[in-house]
């Protein structure tokens, strides 16, 4: 954060205008209200990860003992956990006629410590755009689920690979 000559610092890392702009962009890019975003964010560019997350989200909503309270899909389609009443606004969501550029899915906990997953599609431009806007929400953690290039010959299918750097030479 910037420190002013008098030693004071801004109250927040982002200006109000930047936050307002980013919240509007999140709604546009993900087709979900920014209020649904959780503090743990997963990014992917593979549809099969999204499909599995959606399956998991619906399974959690069918489990009355789940620690999750809602699952939100693009268009602000809210599914509440079985046994929980709908909240005002839940009925307003409807699936969009086509998916947005970077659809968002939210497996929500009451304390916002759930998981948001965003399909960023292909290309570093999408990744930069969405992370710049999600940054204003100050998530606790975010990680990209995808693939790594330049794997070692000693690695096998199913090995866990933690990328520690990003290099692009094109």
Image (cartoon, rainbow, N blue to C red):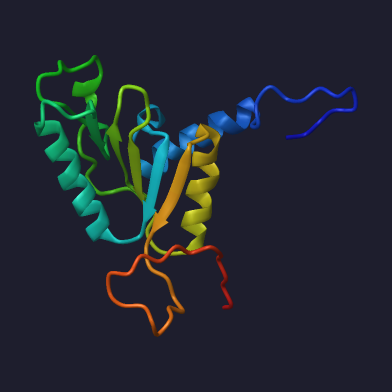
**53 to 15, vertically: above or below:** below
Determine the residue positioned at 35% across, 60% down. Answer: 45
Task: Determine whether, in the image, residue 122 is placed left or right of residue 81.
Answer: right
Q: Say which of 85 and 164 sits in front.
A: 164
The picture places residue 81, in percent across and down from the top left corner, at 15, 26
Task: Determine whether, in the image, residue 157 is placed left or right of residue 113.
Answer: left
Q: Quadrant of residue 32?
A: top left
The picture places residue 123, in percent across and down from the top left corner, at 46, 64
**79 to 155, vertically: above or below:** above
The quarter in which the N terminus is drawn is: top right
The picture places residue 14, in percent across and down from the top left corner, at 64, 32
Determine the residue positioned at 28% across, 69% down. Answer: 158
Q: Say which of 16 and 47 sits in front.
A: 47
Q: Quadrant of residue 116?
A: top left
The picture places residue 118, in percent across and down from the top left corner, at 36, 48
The quarter in which the C terminus is drawn is: bottom right
Residue farthest to the right, as pictured: 5
Q: Quadrant of residue 21?
A: top right
Determine the residue positioned at 38% across, 68% down. Answer: 147
Determine the residue positioned at 37% across, 27% down. Answer: 112
Q: How many marks?
A: 0
**157 to 127, vertically: above or below:** below
Task: Determine whether, in the image, residue 29 is placed left or right of residue 22.
Answer: left
**109 to 160, vertically: above or below:** above
Residue farthest to the bottom, as pictured: 153
Q: Say which of 27 and 141 sits in front.
A: 141
């Amino acid at each position: 954060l910037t420190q002013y000559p008098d030693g004071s610092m801004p109250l927040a890392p982002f200006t109000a205008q930047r936050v307002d702009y980013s919240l509007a962009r999140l709604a546009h890019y993900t087709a979900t209200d920014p209020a649904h975003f959780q503090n743990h964010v997963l990014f992917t560019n593979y549809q099969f990860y999204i499909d599995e997350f959606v399956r998991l989200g619906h399974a959690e909503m069918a489990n009355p003992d789940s620690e999750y309270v809602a699952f939100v899909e693009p268009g602000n389609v809210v599914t509440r956990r079985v046994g929980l009443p709908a909240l005002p606004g839940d009925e307003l969501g409807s699936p969009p006629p086509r998916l947005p550029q970077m659809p968002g899915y939210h497996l929500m906990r009451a304390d916002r410590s759930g998981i948001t997953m965003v399909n960023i599609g292909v290309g570093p431009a999408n990744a930069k755009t969405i992370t710049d806007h999600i940054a204003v929400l100050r998530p606790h953690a975010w990680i990209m689920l995808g693939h790594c290039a330049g794997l070692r010959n000693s690695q096998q299918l199913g090995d866990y690979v933690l990328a520690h750097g990003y290099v692009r030479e094109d």
